[in-house]
Amino acid sequence: MLAFVPTPIGNLGDISFRTIEVLKDGELILCEDTRVTKKLINLISQRLEIQLPQYEYISLHSHNEKAFLTKENQVLLERKKCIYMSDAGMPCVSDPGSYLVDFCLENNIEYDVLPGANAILTAYASSGFSNTTFTFFGFLPHKGSNRSDMLDKVMNSENLAILYESPHRLMKLIEEIDELDPNREIFLTKELTKKFQTRYKNKVNVVLNELKTTTIKGEWVVIIKNVESGNRGIITEQDILDLQLPPKQKAKVLSKLTGDNVKDIYNSLVSK
C-alpha cells in the first residue's frame, strides 16, 4: 500500500488528521530530500507530542523517479506500508510523483492520495479573480525561445494563467510581462500560509514599481488575468511595432500575427 501525502507549504498547523494517522502506521517514506523530510517528521513529532515510527527513508526525486520503477521495488511497495511525501505541498503538482502513480495503476498496486496544502489553489482563492477556469503553467523555461514562446501562450491564454516563480527570477518575469502588456491585471503572492505572506494585485506597471521597493525573497505564485474574448484578434501590426521590444522578440510576435518569415521581418526591422 502506498499513500501520497501532501505536506504543509509553510504553516505546520496545516498538517491533517489523516496525514498523522498515515504517518503513525507507516514503515517506509519515499521523499524528494531525506534531510528535509526527516526535519519535518521531527517537527511534527515535537509539536503534537507524538511518537512516530523509525522509518526507512528512500530519496525519490525528479532525476531518479523513473529508475526507481522496477519489479523489485514493485514488491517493496506491495509488501510495506509506504508513504510518498513532497518537500512541500501536493505530490505530482509541479513536484515528482506522477510516474509513481502511473506505475501503481499499471501494476495494480494499491495506493491513495490524501488532499492537502496546495499553493495553486490557495493563491487562486486569495486573488479575488472571479474566473472559474485557469491554466497552470508551472515554472517557465529560464531562457531562449522556449521561454518567449511559453510566455506568449501565457499572455494569450483564454483562462487565468497561474505560474510559479523563484525570487531571483521574479523581477525578470514581471518586466517581461510589463513590456508585453503594462495594463494587464496581475496578482502576486509569496510566503503563503506563513507569518509574512504578502499579496499584490494591480496593473503590471503598478506592481512592478511596488516590487522595486520591497523584499523579493520567498517563492512566488503569479496569476495573470486572461485576455477578454471580445478583445482577442484586434491587435494590429502597428500595435506590435509600437511596443518597446527588442527586434528579435518583435519579429517573433509579428510573425505569429502575419504568418510572414521571422528572419525577413527581423531584417526589415533592423534596417530601418
Image (cartoon, rainbow, N blue to C red):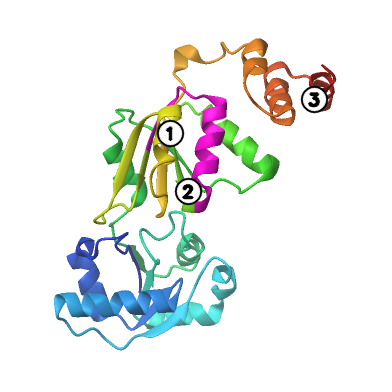
Comparing 214 with 228, the one in front is 214
Which is more N-terminal, label 2 or label 3? 2
Comparing 237 with 98, the one in front is 237
Q: Where residue 266 is drawn, which disc sits there? A: 3
Residue at 57% across, 72% down: 64
Distance, label 3 to label 2, CA atoms, is 30 Å
Compared with residue 152, is residue 139 higher up or lower down, i.e. above or below? below
Residue at 53% across, 82% down: 72
Q: Secondary structure at mark 2?
A: strand
Distance, label 1 to label 3, CA atoms, is 31 Å
Q: Which residue is mark 1?
A: 209
Comparing 46 with 130, the one in front is 46
Residue 171 lies in the magenta stretch: yes
Residue at 49% across, 73% down: 60
Q: Where residue 90 is drawn, which disc sits there? A: none
Compared with residue 161, is residue 253 higher up or lower down, i.e. above or below? above
Q: Which residues are magenta?
A: 168-187
Quarter of the image where one finds residue 148: top right
Which is more N-terminal, label 3 or label 1? 1
